[in-house]
Structure formats: C-alpha cells, structure tokens
Image (cartoon, coloured by chain):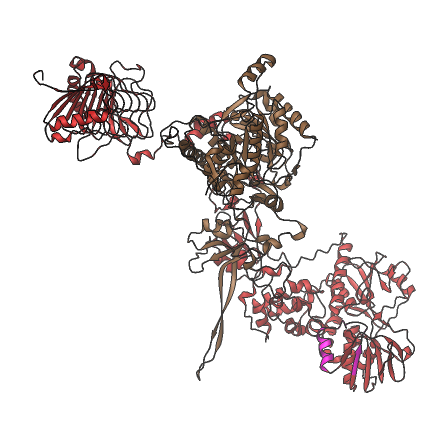
Chain colours: A red, B brown
C-alpha cells in the first residue's frame, strides 16, 4: 500500500470549502478517469465514497482525511473500500449496499443506518441509533457493523438483519455497552456484545447462548476487525468466549408471547398474598366464588321446577258452588273406575243427577279451560245424568252432635247429608208433605224427569233416618230446639213472594204459587200471559204457561233481564218475548198498564220479582238484614248455635244452596271437634298453565263419559301422561310410586338445569318454575 | 301468541316488542339451555298444534283432519317478560338456532312499560349511538414541523396530575407560610370511574381492582379506579392496593363508618377522595338499593343490616350552598387523611358547572373537578332521567377549561371528563379529544364493563337490566349464581389488555403531535370538526 499513489481531492479550494456536489462530481470523474486510489481531504462534505459503480468490478480505495460530513459511504458499492483516518459524523454507511468502511475513530449517530450489505468497522464508540433499520437480503451476505467500544442510545431500532458486534473496549459508559433502550422494534439479525448492559426490548429480542459455530465466526472475524482498525494487540483480551453474549430478534411467533406475568400467578403471589386467602372479600364470605358455567344444575340453578299437583283447583271445581272435583271424576273414568267416579259425587252433593244432570246451569262448564280457549267444554251433564246410579258407601255410625235442620230443600238436605256423612245425628224438619223444597215444589217437571228426583230422594231417605215433614215451627219451638240440639241449621228458603205495590196487585199471581200449582196441573192460564220479572223463574213460568196453553207470552223487566242458561233458552224456544225497561203502573182487568200509559193486554199476569224468607219464627237474637238472615262466612248467625243457609240468607242457585250446606256441615263438624272452623278453598289455577293444544279443537259433542274423560285437560291435577319425563332434556324427571298407591314426579336436582321445559309441556299445568332459594341460605343449610 | 280473543290496551304481539326471537325449528336440539339461561324468562317451551287437512276426492277415500302437536321455543308477549335482546340464548345455543333480532320499527312496548303507573326504570345508557366526540379529528399531524415521534419506538410519559397545582413561586410561598402544599398525584389519564361494590358484583369489582393492581405493580402504569359509593371491602382498605383507589363519598355515606375506622390501620393513603354531587346518567336522580338486593355481603361492606333498603338521595342532605358544599366537604375529607390526600368534587354535566368551578378556584384545597356528561351510564335510573337529562361533556369541559384559561389557572385545577367516552369503541380517540379540549384525564365506566367483562349493553337499548340484578354476564348482579359466571382473573386480564391497547392508541394519536413527555391538555389547535357550529362552540378548527 505504501507504494500506491493516491489521487487527491481536496475539500478546500482557494481557502473555500467546496460544495458537496462539486466534490461528488470530482470523485466520480476521478473514478471515470481510471483512478482506483483516491484520497479525500474532507471538509464536512456529504456522502463521501458512496456510489462509485463506475469502477465496475475494480476495487476502489478511498482514504478520507480531515473532517468528513454526514453519510460517509452512503449507498456504497461492493467495489468500494473506505478508510477514514479519524472520526465520522452521522449515518456512516447509510444505505450501504456493499462497501467496506473502516473508521479509525468514533462514529456519531446513525452508524450503519439502513445498510443492507457491506461492513463497517469502527475503532471507537458510536452515537445514538446505530444499526437502525438494517436489512438482510438473502441474495447477499448479512451487513456487519463492528464497534470497538460501546454504542449509544436506541441502538438497533427496527433492525431487520445484519450482524452487529460491540466489543465493549473502553466503553463510553462502563456500566452499559448497549446504551439506553436498544433493540426496540428489532425483527432480525444478531448482536454480539461484550460487557454489561442495562436492558433491551424484551418484547422484540432475546438473549441466546453463543453456539460453537457462532463463536468460530466471531473469533475469525474479530481478528479481521482488529487488523482493519490496526489493533491486533487486543485480540487476546477480546477473544475470551465467556465475555461475550448474543442478542437475536424474536421470531414473529415468539413476539406474541408477551413476557407478562400471568394473572393467576399475580393473583396468587401478589393479590392474595397482600389481601389474604380468598382475596378481596375472603374474610366476608365463606362460599366458593370460582367460575361456573351458564348452564348449571343443583343448587346453582337460578330456577327450579316444582310439581304442584293438586295445589290449585281446576276452573270447573273452583266455579262449582258445590265444589265438586269434576276433574277427579274424569281421572277415575280414565283409570277405568267409572263406578267410583259416579259415587264420588255423593261426597259433595246429595243430588248429583238432579242438579248436575238437569237443573244446574253447570257453572263448571262455563268455567272450563277449553271453553276459554275456544273449544267445547267437557260435558259434565253426561256424568251428572249417570250419577243416578251413585251408591252410598260406608255411612259412619251416628256418634256425634245432635243437629236440627229446619227446611228440607236443597240447602237443608245438603247440610243434613254432609252432617250425616260425618256421623252427626241430624233431624230434618219441613212443613211440606215431601222433601226437596223447590226441586219438588216449584221447578217445572219439564226441566227434569220425575223418576230422577224420586230416585235421589229415595237414596236420601234411606240414609237420613230422622225426617219430620209437615212441621210448621214457631218461635217457641225454636227456643225449645235450642236446648234439645247442639246446633240448628235454618234452611227454610224464601217462601213469601214479593209483589208490586200497584193498584190491582191482587190480580197478580205470584210465580211461586203459579209454579207449585202448575206442577199439579192445578191452574189455568189465558191466551195472553204477561210475566213481570224476566229472571230464570220468570222463564220457568213462561214455559209452564205455554205448556198450559198460553199463546202469547211476554216477560217484562225494569232492566235487562238477568235470566240465562237453560231456562232462558227454553223460554225463547217457546216463543216468549222479552221487553225492558218498562215500569208497571197498575194491573187492570185488561192487563198491565205501564207508567207510560201504554196498556199491555193480558189474561193472566204473573209476578216473578223474587221471593222473601218468612222469618217470623226466628228469635230476636238472630240479626236480620233487609229481610234475610245475616251470617258470617261459615253461615253462622248472630246466635252461634244457629246457622242459616240457602235462600233464607241470599237468593241463589240450587248448587249454591248445596255448597252452603256442605260448608256449614264442615264448620259444625270442626266446631264440635273443638277446632276453629276454617275454609281454605284452593285457588283456581291460572288457565294459561294448561295446554289445550293437545286436544282436538273440532270436537264439539261428547258421546260418553269415557270420551269426556279423554278430552279433559285435568287442570292442576296430574294426568300421569309422562310427557314431562319425556320432554326433560336432561332426563331429570322420574315417576315415583308412593306407598299409598299414589305417585309423584320427582326431579333430580343434579341433572336438572331449570329450563322449564316440563312447565311448558305439561298439559295439566302442574309444573311451575320458581326462583331457587338464595344460595347463601342453601349453603347455610348444608 | 293468541290472546283468546279478548285484548286489552296493553295486549302486545311479538311484533310490538323491541326484540324478536328468531328460532329455527329445524336446527333446535331442545336442550333447554336457552330457556334456562334467559335472564328475564322471555322464552319458554311452547306446545303448538298443527292441523293437516287431508283432502280426498276419490270414491273410496274420505277427506280428513290430522292434528299434530309439536314443541318449539315460544317468545312471551307479556311486557313483564319482554325479550331484552341480550342474546344469552344465542350464547348458550349449541346449534346456533336462536337469536334475538331488533325490531324494524319503534317498539310498542315503550308505550306500555309503565303499568301500575310506574314509569320505566332501567340500567345502562342513553342509547344514542351518535356523539360529537367521534366527530372530532386530530388534524395537526407533525411530520417535519415538530419532531415527529413514533408511538412504537419513542418513550412516552402519559401521565396526568390530580391535585391542586400551585405555580412554583406560590408553592414555595405556601410552603413557607403554611408549612403545607396541596398533595398532587401523578396518575394515568384513563381512570376507571365510580362503580360501587353493590352496583357491580363482587367478582367484577375484584377483577377491576386486581387488573388495576397488576397495571401498577407489574407494568408500572399508575392507573387509578374510583370506588363508587357502596363501601370498600375491609381487606382492601387495609392493603397497599388502596393507594390505587379513589374513594368516593356520596349522599348515601354507605360504608363510610368502616372507612373512617380503617384510616388508622391504612398502610397507604388512597389516591384521592371524590365527592359525588351528581351523575351524568341521571342528574338530579338518586338511587335506591332495594332491600332484597342487600344480601349479607353487601350489608357487611356497606355497614348496614341485611334486608333493608338503602337510599342514596339525589342531593347531599346538609349542604345548602355551593360555598358551603365546597368548603365543608372538602375540608372534612382533607382532614381525615391529615391533608395528604387530594379531594375533589364530581358533578354531572350542567350549565352550572362554571359556577362550581369558580368556587373551586377560590378554594385553595380543591384538587380538581370531575364532570360526568349525559352519556354516562348507571346501574338504575328512570328512563326519562337517563334519556333526557344532562349536558353533553364536550362543550361543558371546554367551557370550564377556557374559563380557567381566562383566569390563567388552566394548569392549576385539573378537570376530569366522563360520560360516553368510547361508547362506540373509540376509547383513545374520544379520550384524546377531551384531553385536547381541556380535560386532564377521563373516567370510563361502561366501556370497561363492555371490554373487560363482556357487558352486552349497546347504544340500542339492548339488555339494560343492570337494575334488576339479573345481569346475564354477572357484572351487576349480587347473585352468586350469576356473578360466578365472571372470573375475576379474566376480568383483570382484560383490564390490562384494555389499558395497554389504549396506551398504544393514545400514543398513536399524540406521537404525530410531537408530544411525548406531557399530555396535550387543552391542545385544541390539534383538533377539528366538520360541523361549523360545533367548531364555533368548542372553539376549535372547522375542517371540511
């Protein structure tokens, strides 16, 4: 080299610094002119030694003295060798594509910035942001940056390739050869370094052991580096393998594994350690707070199914004033026990055939869930008519209290019947020749076959030993009975017809009298009959009048008539007309004169505006209100020994009278046992719980009790159909037989998820989904 | 569902409800999970009758009817069981055959949700998806004019100050004359706003606290969380983690006897004390924690017997004027911790905010002012309060900041903004916008519930049943059966994710502004909006 003659280019001409552009022109010209050894005496010019491609494959040696400017060797070509005799400014080897650059001094910021090939050897330290943005192109070798000392801050940012070697010899900061925050954004390349450091971007890079191959490469190239920078003497000092460390970029896959302490570790080691076992509220709660799935079983269910069999009354039973459990009877029929179904009625009524089969407006059917959902009600009259065969079983021996029942109509008979069934000694008094009250005295025979009534009365007489007919009682009799009997039930009905206080009222025939006489064909009617009062009794009168030969029948009322059901239909069927509102002014020979002055011609005028009880025989201790006896909710009068039921209390239906009889009997029974009488009727089931979709909506007539039984939804009482067992997605429901022959549906809480499918599917509305008990309570019970 | 022929004014069909359940019969496995999981029992197994008419014309054939019964998932129409659209059914369905779909028109339910004369109450949000914050753009992008910073590479000190910051000379004077200067905390500008223990489930609350502790202790981010007013678990009060907590005192004073008793045993001072005067979601509306929600745990933490109703009146009961409120409350609470803990009030967004601020300026203790805008969320409020009461946060905070600028005190009393920040997911952008409008930091509630715990509430009246304790995600429920669905650890992890992601996004916004060492509080030259009047009102650039 000593013999080589360098072509010299001076950065100062005539005492003035030449422009970087001029220097570049002269460099390029020198290369074009064939110069391959060029010495530049630099004076701050930019980019010296780069871009010398014009030399082609010839090596070009550029020696730089003086003070080069920024970017020495920028875009340097592989044919170029640059030696700088002192320090360099920023960005030495910027975007180097192959030049070898030796700097015999320090380098400022940005050394090797964005270089892709070539080598840079620095004999001192470098400033900030060295080896930034360096690349590796697989077509060429890795670029290299060698630094004898240390590097400045932010080293190797976004380094994407190449090899940096930091020898740590006399570093600027003896504590840290890598500077502040190196390797941020580093994605490729390797950094060998020797000496202490104060961290690097762990997210981007990692320390790895130096392999034998690595070391062989480093050792060999360290020798070259030291020769290039003329310090071979340092080889022994720097070539101790144990002094060296290697940082490499993390792979993209590794980068996602952020070196964060796991939260469970933090919870265990930091959180719970500071707060105590169980964390934030471990001292306040003792139950498990660990995660659970959304779908849970057992005590973790939010809602649980409950099999509410027989908890609610079906609408039919709830609507029946007598309280007959119609659905139980259909159930018995479905079970093939029709006899038992028929007999069951006698537990509730002494007149199952007469009333349910004929005389009752069948409120049960009006109330039937099927009816509410646009379907035909199950026809209870089929069962009612069949009940004529009902047999009395197991009447208990008489052992209880003595009870007098005054009045042998539906109410009195019902009370007597029920008291007898409970073993009490009952005596029935009636002033008529036969039992039955309105049933046998007043109700037209057209409404019910005589033999049905007879059959049921016979059954009664067999079971009620003490019946005293044609007994008209007085106040004194009653006083005496008070000492003879434990309890007295007054069921004398309403026997005094109400009439109108108008002129000619003596011409009126009371409906009660009319009906009593018409039953015996003991009355004649004219062609034109006017009935004042268009209730159901009025309708009965109309039908009877028609039977007796009346041709024009008109029912008057002061308001919209209250008549309904069979009676109303029968009256309409015989052509009776209704007129309202009209007010009677007088009854004349010609007929009924209205307050308007109009005269309605009539041959016969019947008044049917209700009846009133005859209460003359009552002692003064019994309170009366508006003509009727006052009672409490167990039909007890103001004399606690005396009860009153039926029309003597309030005008009503036969079934209501029968129901009152049953209630009063139970009350007396309870009192006689020393209990407080209570009457909790079960609430009626919400019809929405019942699913009539299971039944044929086009079915409108029922042939037999069996057919009725099939179509009954059995609201509130399990039909034992097993749909819930089948529908349960968890197989959690099972049917379990009980010792008494009954059964129940049982839920396995460990299987059940509380979905309520059983509730949704149950035809009878038995299942209910209820909120589970608070977990705190359930755990406390364990 | 058929109505049996009779209808009432409130008989609604599925069409009238806000959400319709779309159920696919073909794919349904009838596993029962949807009906078991539905928080409001909006769906049930239904029994359906299908009629098949079999016509026949032949000589030997008879036409007939066949009824088939089949089962399906039926949506209830009773307003009490109306679907809330939470989608828990969809979440648990193994066959993806059920999903609630938003009605294509205004629902009729809203006209009938006041049965018994009780107007609608709910939890959640205002349900207005739009907002001015999303429209604010960052228009000053420095490439060559300022040192352009790189969010990924540069170091940022994204910290803010909470406390009364006196000018240096005044500080010295204060110290010399009074031997005391107001305490100031250097904290992260994104604060988890006040959500009480009780409003949130124990697992949610613990998850948030744990995440905050992790951010502080593992990642060095000084994130703070406000306790809300529902008491603080005794263990937290006595742990070092209390320093990450801003303790709130409100009109109900729940749990404050326990807090006061814990002061002598505290290892660390809390970050600050927030005096709540108002809540953005329901200004002027108080709260009532119903007795049946006051279980043993809530009772223990709030320092009350279980099973009593806990009223939080709309106003503090012994404060009769701004001056008194500011002086009395701030003094008392400073005193509790020996004047070492900053104390500041929080009010709901209001046109009277300036009056409050001016009082704070005159009070040398006031450590800041938090304003909660109309888009704030709540656990329970009257719908009318939530939907129609309150003031948007942007102009409110701007007005206050400019007022401070007028007084030359913009660096002395920090303003904190809350209410609807990130309601459409743009947390960092909304926060940065408010900071550049003048906020020193922002408070978030709903966002963290959505992001850290999976709250399904959206700005379309979805779910919003925080008030009834049936939160399907277990976020706002006190029933262990629900809140055990939420793993505190997973919540904490998400809190960390949220803050790290926010941090990066905030850097992405402030880096091009050339800011790295201080938050660009009030740097309104950096923002613009494409609405002339909004620009005028906010005194920022109008850009189109």
- Report the front residue among A397 and A490: A490
Q: Quadrant of residue A174?
A: top left
Magenta-span inclusion, residue B34: no
Q: Is residue A150 above or below residue B87?
A: above
- Front-most of residues A731 and B375: B375
Quadrant location of the C terminus of chain A in the rendered image: top right
Describe residue A222's horizontal placement relative to residue A641 as left or right: left
Extreme left residue here? Answer: A3
Could you tell me residue A611's position as x and y percent?
84, 71
* A336 w.r.t. B150: above or below: below
In which image quadrant can residue A243 be found?
top left
* The one of A384 and A185 positioned closer to us in this rendering: A185
Left or right: B389 as drawn, with respect to A137: right
Q: Relative to A376, is B333 above or below?
A: above
Taking the spot 62% from the left edge, 21% from the top edge, the residue there is: B335
Note whether A620 is above or below A102 in the view shown.
below
| Start-end of magenta stretch | A553-573
In the visual, does B532 lie left or right of A556? left
Residue A211 visible in the current orientation = no
- The image quarter containing residue B328 is top right
Tell me residue B93's x, y (percent): 44, 51
Q: Is residue A568 magenta?
A: yes
Can residue B347 be seen by looking at this rendering?
yes
At 71% across and 77% down in the image, what residue appears?
Answer: A569
Q: Quadrant of the N terminus of chain A?
A: top left
Q: Nearer the viewer, residue B191 or A585?
A: B191
């Amino acid at each position: 080299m000593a013999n080589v003659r360098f072509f010299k280019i001076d950065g100062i001409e005539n005492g003035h610094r030449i422009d970087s552009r001029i220097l570049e022109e002269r460099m390029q010209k020198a290369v074009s002119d064939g110069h391959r050894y060029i010495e530049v005496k630099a004076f701050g010019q930019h980019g010296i030694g780069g871009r010398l491609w014009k030399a082609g494959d010839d090596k070009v040696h550029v020696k730089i003295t003086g003070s080069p400017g920024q970017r020495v060797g920028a875009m340097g070509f592989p044919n170029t060798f640059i030696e700088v005799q002192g320090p360099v400014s920023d960005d030495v080897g910027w975007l180097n594509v192959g030049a070898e650059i030796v700097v015999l001094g320090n380098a400022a910021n940005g050394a090797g910035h964005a270089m892709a090939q070539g080598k840079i050897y620095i004999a001192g330290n470098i400033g900030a942001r060295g080896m930034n943005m360096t690349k590796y192109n697989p077509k060429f070798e890795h670029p290299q940056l060698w630094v004898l000392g240390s590097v400045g801050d932010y080293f190797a940012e976004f380094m994407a390739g190449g090899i940096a070697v930091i020898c740590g010899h006399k570093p600027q900061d003896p504590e840290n050869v890598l500077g502040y925050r190196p390797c941020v954004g580093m994605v490729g390349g390797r950094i060998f370094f020797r000496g202490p450091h104060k961290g690097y971007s762990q997210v981007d890079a990692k320390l790895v052991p130096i392999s034998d191959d690595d070391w062989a490469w480093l050792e060999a190239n360290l020798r070259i580096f030291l020769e290039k920078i003329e310090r071979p003497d340092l080889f022994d000092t720097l070539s101790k393998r144990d002094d060296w460390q290697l940082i490499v970029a993390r792979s993209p896959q590794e980068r996602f594994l952020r070196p964060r302490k796991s939260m469970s570790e933090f919870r265990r080691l930091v959180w719970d350690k500071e707060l105590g076992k169980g964390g934030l509220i471990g001292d306040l709660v003792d139950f498990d707070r660990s995660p659970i799935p959304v779908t849970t079983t057992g005590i973790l269910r939010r809602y649980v199914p409950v099999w509410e069999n027989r908890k609610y009354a079906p609408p039919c039973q709830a609507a029946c004033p007598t309280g007959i459990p119609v659905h139980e009877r259909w159930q018995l029929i479905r079970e093939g026990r029709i006899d038992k179904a028929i007999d069951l009625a006698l537990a509730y009524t002494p007149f199952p055939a007469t009333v349910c089969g004929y005389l009752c407006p069948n409120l049960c059917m009006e109330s039937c869930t099927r009816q509410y959902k646009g379907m035909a009600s199950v026809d209870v009259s089929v069962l009612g008519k069949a009940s004529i065969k009902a047999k009395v079983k197991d009447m208990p021996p008489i052992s209880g209290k003595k009870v007098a029942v005054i009045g042998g109509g539906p109410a009195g008979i019902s009370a007597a019947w029920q008291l007898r069934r409970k073993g009490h000694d009952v005596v029935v008094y009636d002033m008529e020749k036969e039992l039955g009250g309105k049933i046998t005295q007043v109700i037209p025979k057209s409404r019910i076959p005589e033999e049905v009534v007879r059959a049921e009365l016979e059954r009664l007489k067999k079971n009620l030993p003490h019946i005293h007919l044609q007994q008209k009682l007085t106040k004194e009799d009653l006083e005496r009975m008070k000492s003879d009997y434990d309890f007295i039930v007054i069921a004398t009905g309403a026997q005094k017809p109400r009439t109108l206080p108008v002129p000619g009222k003596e011409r009126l025939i009371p409906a009660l009298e009319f009906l009593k006489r018409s039953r015996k064909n003991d009355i004649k009617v004219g062609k034109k009959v006017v009935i004042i009062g268009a209730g159901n009794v009025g309708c009965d009168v109309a039908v009877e009048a028609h039977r007796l030969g009346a041709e024009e029948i008109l029912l008057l009322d002061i308001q919209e008539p209250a008549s309904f059901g069979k009676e109303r239909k029968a009256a309409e069927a015989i052509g009776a007309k209704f007129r309202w509102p009209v007010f009677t002014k007088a009854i004349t020979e010609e007929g009924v004169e209205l307050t308007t002055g109009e005269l309605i011609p009539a041959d016969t005028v019947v008044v049917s505006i209700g009846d009133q009880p005859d209460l003359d025989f009552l002692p003064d201790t019994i309170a009366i209100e508006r003509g009727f006896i006052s009672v409490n909710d167990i039909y007890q009068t103001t004399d606690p020994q005396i009860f009153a039921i039926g029309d003597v209390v309030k005008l009503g239906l036969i079934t209501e009278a029968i129901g009152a009889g049953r209630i009063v009997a139970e009350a007396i029974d309870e009192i006689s046992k020393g209990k407080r009488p209570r009457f909790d009727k079960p609430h009626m089931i919400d019809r929405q719980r019942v699913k009539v979709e299971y039944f044929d909506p086009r079915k409108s007539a029922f042939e037999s009790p069996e057919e009725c039984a099939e179509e009954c939804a059995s609201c509130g009482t399990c039909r034992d159909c097993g749909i819930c067992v089948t529908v349960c997605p968890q197989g959690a429901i099972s049917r379990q037989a009980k010792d008494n022959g009954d059964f129940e549906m049982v839920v396995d809480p460990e299987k059940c998820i509380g979905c309520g499918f059983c509730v949704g599917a149950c035809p009878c509305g038995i299942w209910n989904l209820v909120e589970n008990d608070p977990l705190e309570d359930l755990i406390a019970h364990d | 569902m058929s109505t049996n022929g009779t209808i009432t004014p409130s008989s609604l069909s599925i069409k009238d409800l806000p959400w319709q359940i779309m159920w696919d019969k073909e794919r349904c496995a009838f596993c029962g999970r949807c009906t078991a999981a539905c928080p409001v029992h909006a769906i049930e197994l239904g029994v359906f009758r299908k009629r098949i008419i079999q016509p026949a014309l032949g000589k030997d054939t008879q036409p007939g009817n066949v009824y088939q019964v089949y089962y399906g998932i039926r949506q209830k129409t009773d307003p009490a069981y109306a679907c809330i659209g939470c989608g828990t059914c969809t979440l648990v369905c193994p066959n993806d055959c059920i999903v609630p779909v938003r009605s294509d028109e205004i629902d009729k339910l809203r006209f009938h949700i006041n049965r018994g004369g009780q107007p609608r109450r709910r939890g959640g949000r205002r349900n207005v998806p739009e907002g001015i914050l999303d429209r604010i753009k960052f228009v000053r992008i420095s490439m060559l004019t300022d040192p352009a910073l790189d969010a990924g590479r540069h170091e940022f000190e994204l910290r803010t100050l909470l406390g009364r910051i006196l000018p240096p000379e005044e500080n010295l004077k204060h110290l010399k004359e009074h031997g005391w200067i107001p305490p100031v905390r250097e904290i992260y500008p994104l604060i988890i706003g006040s959500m009480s223990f009780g409003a949130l489930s124990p697992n949610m609350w613990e998850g948030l606290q744990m995440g905050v502790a992790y951010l502080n202790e593992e990642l060095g981010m000084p994130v703070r969380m406000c306790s809300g007013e529902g008491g603080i678990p005794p263990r937290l009060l006595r742990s070092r983690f209390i320093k990450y907590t801003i303790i709130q005192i409100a009109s109900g004073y729940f749990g404050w006897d326990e807090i006061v008793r814990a002061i002598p045993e505290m290892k660390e001072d809390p970050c600050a004390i927030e005096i709540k005067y108002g809540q953005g979601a329901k200004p002027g509306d108080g709260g009532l924690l119903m007795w049946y929600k006051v279980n043993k745990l809530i009772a223990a933490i709030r320092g009350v017997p279980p099973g009593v109703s806990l009223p939080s009146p709309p106003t503090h009961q012994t404060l009769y004027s701004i001056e008194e409120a500011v002086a009395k409350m701030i003094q008392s609470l400073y005193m509790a911790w020996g004047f070492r803990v900053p104390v500041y009030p929080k009010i709901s967004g209001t046109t009277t905010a300036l009056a409050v601020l001016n009082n704070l300026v005159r009070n040398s203790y006031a450590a800041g002012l938090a304003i909660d805008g109309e888009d704030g969320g709540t656990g329970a409020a009257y719908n009318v309060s939530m939907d129609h009461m309150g003031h948007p946060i942007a102009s409110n905070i701007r007005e206050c900041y400019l007022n401070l600028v007028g007084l030359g005190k913009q660096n002395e009393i920090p303003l904190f903004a809350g209410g609807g920040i990130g309601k459409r997911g743009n947390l960092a952008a909304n926060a940065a916008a408010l900071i550049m409008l003048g906020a020193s930091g922002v408070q978030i509630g709903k966002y963290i519930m959505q992001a850290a715990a999976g709250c399904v509430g959206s700005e379309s009246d979805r779910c919003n049943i925080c008030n009834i304790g049936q939160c399907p995600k277990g976020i706002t429920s006190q029933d262990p059966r629900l809140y055990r669905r939420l793993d505190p650890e997973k919540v904490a992890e998400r809190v960390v994710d949220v803050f790290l992601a926010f941090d990066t996004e905030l850097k992405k916004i402030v880096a091009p502004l050339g800011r790295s060492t201080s938050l660009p509080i009030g740097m309104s030259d950096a923002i613009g909006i494409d609405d002339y009047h909004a620009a005028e009102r906010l005194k920022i650039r109008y850009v189109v």
